[in-house]
Structure formats: C-alpha cells, structure tokens
Image (cartoon, rainbow, N blue to C red):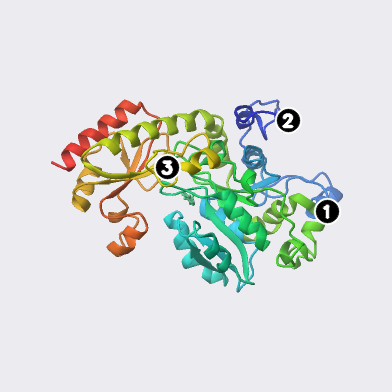
C-alpha cells in the first residue's frame, strides 16, 4: 500500500485487500491452523524464507498478518509482528536482542506489570533490567554498560501525567549505539509516532486503545527497519549465523525486515506467544476508528482533568494536558494531538475516601484495564499496588489518596456529573 495515504485512510485500508479467493471486502477470519503447500518445492521455499507465505498459524496467519501490516503502516515502521498480549510483545521485542547476562536500561515510569516483568520474571532468562529516571540523561547514559542491549521507555507513561522526551532519550541511545524500544500503548500512533523521534522498535498492548473496546488481549512489535544490527557485534541472533534457523544471517539476508522475520521464524515458532485470528479480527475492527476515538478521548480527558483540578475536594491532578503539569511543555513536540486520556487524581480524605469514591461511581467501571471506550477507574493502593508499602506506593504514583482514571468517549458532561456525585458521597 502506498505510503502517501493519510492516517485515517491507512487505519481502514492498510494490510487489507479484497480476499483473493472470494472477493470478501472485510478481512476474513482465517480460522485455520495449517495451509496446504502447492508442492514440495513450495514447502521448501517457505521454510527457507525464500518465498513469503503461510505454513502454520503459530508463525503466521493471514488475518493476523493484515493487522501487523496495518499497525506497521500507522507507526511508519518497516514491519510488525503481532502476539498474544502486550506483555508477550515486550518479551518478543527483547528476545532477538538479549543473551543470558544481558540487561535492558528501563525508565522508572512504566506500567506496573512491566516493572514486575522486568524486575523478576526476565531474570529466569538470565536477563535483567536497570531502572533509571529518564529525565536524568546523564544517569541514563551512565547506566549503559557492555552488557546493555536495549533502552526501554513508554511515550506517554502509564498511569499518565508523564511524557518521555523521546528525542533526548533517542539521542543517548544513538550515542551508545543501542536500540530504543518505546511502548506506545497509552499514546497510540495517532498521538505519538516514536519512530519519528528516533525509536528503533515500538511495542503495543493492542488490548487497549488499538482494539478500543475491551474485548481481546493482544500485542505488537513494530520495527523501524533503521537499526544496523551488524555494526557492533552485540546482536548475533540478527547479524551472525542463527543456529536456531539453520545458520541464516537474518540481517544480511533480510535487511530492514531482519527483526520482523526473526521474530516470526524463531520468536513465534519457539516461544509460541501467537495472536489468534479471532483476536486479530476484533483489533482490526477497532483500529478502523482509532483516530475518531482518540480525538474524543483526548477532548474528554482535557475537559474532565480541567474540571477536577478546580474542584476543592481534589488535591491534585497529574495530566500533561494541563498547564500546571511539569511535562506540559513536551506535549506539542512529542504528542501534538494531545496528552492521552489517562491520568491520576488525588482526592481529599485519603484511602477511605478513595474506596468510597470507587463504590459511588456509577458510569465509571472499577476495573484493572485502560483504553476502553468506557470510562474506567482503579484505586491502585487497594488493588494493583496493595502488596507495596505506603511509601513505595506513593513513589510509584499510586499513593493512598490517588485514583487512576481512563477517560472514555461518553458525553463529557455525563462523566463529569458522575465524578461530581461520587466526590460528594466520598468526601461527605
Ligand atoms: C496493558 C499494558 C501493557 C501490558 O499489556 P497486556 O496486553 O495487558 O499484556 C504494557 N504496557 C502498557 C503501557 C500497558 O498499558
């Protein structure tokens, strides 16, 4: 598909073509595990990656491939691989880059589940993470050592209120010769295009805004196709003969598609964190209206955050769309269409008031999710962060008096009215 189409056109058409067998206009759900080879030569060519085609749905499936192509187009990448969840995407992003003993330098401002995955679970692979304040660029550069293989951050960091200076972080990554991985889940490519700011790889939890309606979990890794995997000798899975794929040199053979092909031919084949075609279908449906939804999400979030900030029952609101935010000045450069729809609000009355508020809300759903058409709320201190000490919770932006809001696309007046009545009952 020609790259000159605009975002609104690509979100509907990229990756999709009338079904060659039936002419079906919508991307069919190819509910099949395997694909018949034309003959033995065809099968051999597919296994040698000499011809692109379908072998087995753990590796590739036409419905899932259409979604990957669409997400790559929206992010301005060379290729993308879809997987079973956002967390799977993070492992898939690191997998071709890391070896036992290697580390990733990650921002302290990350989705809680990612902090957990990087702090503990990846150690089982012999990998580790160092968490650094990415506003301290000297500390970021100093944290990089000979075993560092990637730098990882979020564009708009969950739970909101923080925007990473991607240009500055990419300049450090460039200087030290490492790939920058950006989790663009909270922003989506409509608000932020990390590759244009120097990102090498972009990861997504498609579970959130890309699907948009809270129906399926999924993830994606987009490769910019711009990183030279052979320059440093640090990425042998991509630059040297890959023992896991009969000695193929992925970078030499596949150029800008090396990462994507490795992720499919080795990553999905051996780790098996595959997206299923039904899931891809729901996400393809959702993504068709991404720009329309994001515009409304941002408009509503802006109105709700401004209303809350003026309310005497509220202590503070952390939303980068508000001039009071210390990150407000980054919005125009990093996410010019708005600061997203996730933020936290601290209410007077502490832990007890927050628990009462969550029960009193009627339109908002109390769930551990975000990026839904519906407005969502969670009191992190009594749920996702309850194992942490009050001090550790406060440091993570999940203090006892803090609620995380994910503003939906309902009528802004109804969202505000619901918050108003709940605040009245919570702080009475
Ligand atoms: C939800 C989320 C993830 C994890 O995605 P899952 O699809 O739940 O595995 C990762 N990063 C961010 C920013 C998220 O919001």
Q: Tell me if residue 3 can be seen.
A: yes
Mark 2 secondary-structure assignment: loop
Mark 3 secondary-structure assignment: loop
Give the distance between the C-alpha atoms of the residues marked 3 and 2, in whole angstroms: 49 Å
- Figure disc tally: 3
Residue topped by disc 2: 21
Q: Tell me if residue 1 can be seen.
A: no
x 73%, y 30%: residue: 21
List x then y, in percent, for residue 233. Answer: 74, 67
Q: Is residue 336 left or right of residue 254?
A: left
Q: Nearer the viewer, residue 177 or 29?
A: 177
Pointer 2 local density, CA inside 10 Å: few below 14, some 14–19, many at least 20: few
Badge number at residue 320: 3
x 55%, y 68%: residue: 143
Q: Mark 3 near ligand 1 (CB under 8 Å)?
A: no
**Res 383 quadrant in image:** bottom left
Q: Residue furthest left?
A: 428
- Answer whether labels 3 and 1 touch (C-beta < 8 Å): no
Give the distance between the C-alpha atoms of the residues marked 1 and 2, in whole angstroms: 24 Å
**Res 22 quadrant in image:** top right
Give the distance between the C-alpha atoms of the residues marked 3 and 1, in whole angstroms: 53 Å
Residue topped by disc 1: 44
Q: Considering only vertical position in the picture, is 106 above or below 331?
A: below
List x then y, in percent, for residue 389. Answer: 29, 65
> Looking at the figure, which quarter contains the N terminus?
top right
Q: Earlier in the sequence, mark 3 or mark 1?
A: 1
Mark 1 secondary-structure assignment: helix
Badge number at residue 69: none
Q: Is residue 142 left or right of residue 323?
A: right
Q: Considering only vertical position in the picture, is 200 above or below 248?
A: above
x 74%, y 50%: residue: 257
């Amino acid at each position: 598909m020609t790259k000159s189409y605009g975002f609104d056109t690509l979100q509907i058409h990229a990756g999709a073509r009338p079904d060659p067998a039936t002419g079906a206009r919508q991307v069919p759900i190819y509910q099949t595990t395997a694909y018949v080879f034309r003959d033995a030569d065809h099968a051999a060519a597919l296994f040698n990656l000499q011809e692109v085609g379908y072998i087995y749905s753990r590796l590739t499936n036409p419905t899932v491939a259409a979604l990957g192509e669409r997400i790559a187009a929206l992010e301005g990448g060379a290729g993308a691989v879809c997987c079973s969840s956002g967390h799977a995407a993070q492992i898939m992003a690191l997998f071709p880059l890391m070896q036992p003993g290697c580390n990733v330098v990650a921002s302290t401002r990350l989705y809680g589940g990612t902090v957990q995955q990087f702090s503990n679970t990846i150690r089982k692979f012999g990998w580790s993470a160092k968490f650094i304040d990415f506003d301290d660029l000297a500390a970021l550069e100093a944290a990089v050592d000979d075993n560092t293989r990637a730098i990882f951050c979020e564009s708009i960091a969950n739970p909101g209120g923080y925007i990473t200076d991607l240009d500055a972080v990419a300049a450090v990554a460039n200087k030290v010769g490492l790939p920058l991985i950006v989790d663009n889940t909270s922003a989506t490519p409509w608000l932020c295009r990390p590759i244009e700011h120097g990102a090498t790889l972009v990861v997504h939890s498609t579970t959130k805004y890309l699907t948009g309606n809270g129906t399926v979990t999924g993830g994606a890794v987009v490769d910019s196709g711009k990183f030279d995997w052979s320059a440093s000798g640090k990425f042998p899975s991509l630059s040297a003969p890959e023992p896991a794929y009969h000695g193929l040199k992925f970078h030499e053979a596949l150029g800008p598609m090396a990462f994507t092909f490795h992720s499919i031919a080795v990553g999905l084949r051996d780790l098996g964190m595959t997206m299923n075609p039904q899931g891809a279908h729901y996400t393809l449906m959702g993504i068709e209206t991404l720009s329309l939804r994001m515009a409304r999400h941002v408009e509503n979030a802006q109105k709700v955050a401004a209303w809350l900030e003026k309310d005497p029952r509220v202590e503070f609101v952390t939303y980068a769309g508000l001039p009071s935010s210390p990150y407000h000045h980054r919005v125009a450069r990093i996410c010019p269409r708005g600061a997203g729809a996730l933020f936290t609000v601290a209410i007077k009355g502490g832990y007890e008031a927050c628990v009462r508020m969550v029960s009193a809300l009627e339109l908002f759903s109390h769930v551990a999710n975000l990026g839904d058409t519906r407005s969502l709320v969670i009191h992190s201190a009594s749920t996702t962060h309850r194992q942490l000490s009050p001090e550790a919770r406060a440091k993570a932006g999940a203090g006892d008096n803090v609620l995380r809001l994910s503003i939906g696309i309902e009528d802004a007046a109804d969202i505000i009215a619901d918050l108003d009545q709940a605040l009245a009952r919570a702080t009475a």
